Image: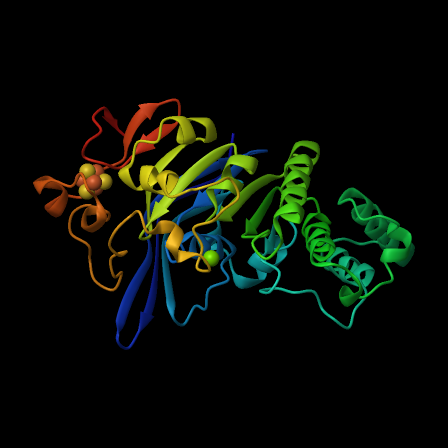
Amino acid sequence: MALLEIENLQTDFVSHGGSVRAVNDLSFQVNSGEIVALVGESGCGKSVTSMSVLRLLPEATTRTDGVIRFDGINLLDLSEAEMRRLRGKAIAMVFQEPMTSLNPVLTVGRQIQETLKIHEKLSRAQARQRAIDMLTLVGIPAPDQRIDEYPHQLSGGMRQRVMIAIALACNPKLLIADEPTTALDVTIQAQILDLIRDLNKRLGSAVIFITHDLGVVAEVADRVIVMYAGRKVEEAQVDALFTDPRHPYTKGLLGAMPVLGSSLSDEAPQSLAEIRGQVPALNKPIVGCVFASRCDLAFERCRHEAPLMTRLGDGHAVACHLEGGAHA
Ligand code: SF4
Ligand code: MG
């Protein structure tokens, strides 16, 4: 069953100089209990998509259109007060640590309890016990001692576990995790991915997992949305994406993936060198296929007509003129 349905999402950043279409006609859904990865290079619109869902983009400089239906309600119709009640409760988030580091002057226990206090009526003792339970759940050893420690007393991996504990404290239906392991070393990263998968199975929260790392996608996702220049270019079950990629961009990403766990990140731009050329500017309309300027297979039609999403069966869909079949 669809928990989140995004239909024709369009997010523009508007300034005096013009506007940038960061997300363009994006549609996808997330079912209850499922882990969906949004993958693509930095700037492809994956974080903007999550910020649009959470309604965290500044209203003065962004315009969001389309439908973001969560549990049957269009989030774009809600007031800010109604959104605040949802954020952190029904929809929780974990970011790459540097973006939303923990509050350095509060103990980790206090920070979990603060979240609980906003959304639930618990006594002090109950909240403390819940915080200890959450720390246990995310695999923090000696939780009854750790609860009184400050963030700087914990390692990066432990801090990210605490962030996950905070995110899951109110039993969210949907967890949005934006590059949650990017700042961590490979071993710790693998542990955190295991933890997210394990918690997803045990608690049943659906997860949107945002990453530029196909190794991470292979580890964690049930289904994958590949984004390029603000658009969805391919969608598939994770196995199908890796064994039978259909979009030239997806093929390029997979070809540019030297080893599992290596990345297509800002920090390692050379890993994308096999896909020549540049992502098109998003401040003017793109005519034709968004990938045409970099696609080795581009032909005449690609330059003046944007390909529609074509359904290939079994949830696999691709936006490329080279694929026939029924349009989605
Ligand atoms: Fe390449 Fe054309 Fe397919 Fe776009 S539509 S990915 S340019 S072949
Ligand atoms: Mg990002």
> Percent from the top left, x then y, of residue 309?
27, 35
Residue 307 shows in this picture: no
Which residue is at a point 21% across and 44% down the rendered structure image?
295
> Percent from the top left, x then y, of residue 127?
84, 54
Q: Residue furthest left?
A: 300
Side of 69 where 206 appears, left or right: right
| The image quarter in which residue 116 lies | bottom right
Q: How many marks?
A: 0
Which residue is at a point 49% across and 48% down the rendered structure image?
211
Q: Is residue 152 above or below residue 140?
A: below
> Percent from the top left, x then y, of residue 168?
69, 47
Which residue is at a point 14% across and 42% down the rendered structure image?
302
Q: How is the model colour-coded?
A: rainbow
Side of 225 where 208 appears, left or right: right
Side of 8 where 281 appears, left or right: left
Is residue 263 or residue 292 the one in the foreground? Answer: 263
Is residue 206 or residue 159 the one in the foreground? Answer: 159
Tell me the quadrant of the picture where the C terminus can be found. Answer: top left
Is residue 242 or residue 122 the one in the foreground? Answer: 242
Which residue is at a point 60% across and 60% down the rendered structure image?
84
Q: Residue furthest bottom?
A: 16
Residue 4 shows in this picture: yes
> Percent from the top left, x then y, of residue 159?
72, 57
